[in-house]
Amino acid sequence: MKHYTTSRVITALLCTTTAALITGCGTDSSEPGANNTEPAAKAKHPFDTMASEQIDKQARESFRNTTSMRLTGKVSSNGQQVEIDLAIDVRGSCNGTVDNSLGTLHIIKKGSLVYAKAGEDYWRATFNRGMTVEQAEKMVGHFTDRWIKPPTLMAKTLGSFCDGFDSVLEILSAEPDGNATRENDATVDGRPTAVLTERTPTDTTTVYIAKEGKPYLLRATITGGNDPLDLTFTDHNKPVDTTPPPPDQILDPTTLR
């Protein structure tokens, strides 16, 4: 399991990202019509006969076919913690929220079209960088809690939250380096998972891989070190809802003087 805590991975996660794992696996069933009054022995899952590096390799191979997912949880980098709840796909579309020290930003992106909504603290911090206090407060009054269709430069900046999928795809689909270890199985939201862990002198990365249904990555954590994270992954391959807000709720900033 190539180490997930490189600055490249963290940057991609902060821009929103990541993954699902592994090829499909099934369990044996008893033969039809078998007359057996003894309880059937619990069938082993294919993972139970695999080395951790085999599971890791299959996970990466399956991940290459993942086209979308929803990420929920916390990511930290350079001392800043970001909470995300974001559906994202390989085309750079997204819908969800990113919450940092400035407040919560809700973003919808499809192609080059970006719509954003945030509270007054977020916009005040944005406009205070290049305006007088009076000018900034006027803009804050216009923007607060309204959907904005940003001009080109702002759209590119805000849209960058949705551009991390390909970077994580490249990183997590690389060949495993054989350093992962298999831990005791666990559950994530009631679903049984296989657990792989990688330890370094500074931190520990743990991934939880579904053992029922399609074996997707359901959770990843990094503890210790400077960039801890705790993310859950749902809605694998589910289309991202990029329906724009109603036109009467959208402010076009280019109409403001």
Image (tube, rainbow, N blue to C red):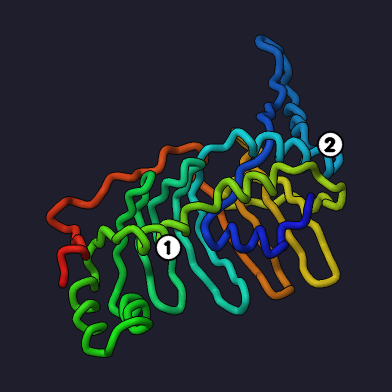
Name the foreground residue: 65 vs 30. 65
Label 2 vs label 1: CA separation? 44 Å
Residue under the image location 48 percent in, 62 percent down: 84
* Residue 176 screen position, x and y as percent: 81, 45
Report the residue marked by disc 1: 157
Nearer to us of marks 2 and 1 is: 1
Count the marks.
2
Which one is in front, 153 or 242?
153
Most extreme residue toward the left, as rendered? 248
Disc 1 element? helix
Give the percent coordinates (x, y) of residue 6: 72, 62
Q: Measured along the vertical axis of the image, is residue 126 above or below residue 19?
A: below
Q: Is residue 4 left or right of residue 153?
A: right
At a point 74% along the width and 35% down the height, the residue shown is 58
- Which amino acid, mark 2? Met
Residue that badge 2 annotates: 50
Marks 2 and 1 in Cβ contact (< 8 Å) = no
Which residue type does callout 1 highlight? Thr
Q: Quadrant of the C terminus?
A: bottom left
Residue 228 in the image: above or below residue 48: below
Query: Residue drawn 55% across and 48% down?
Result: 165
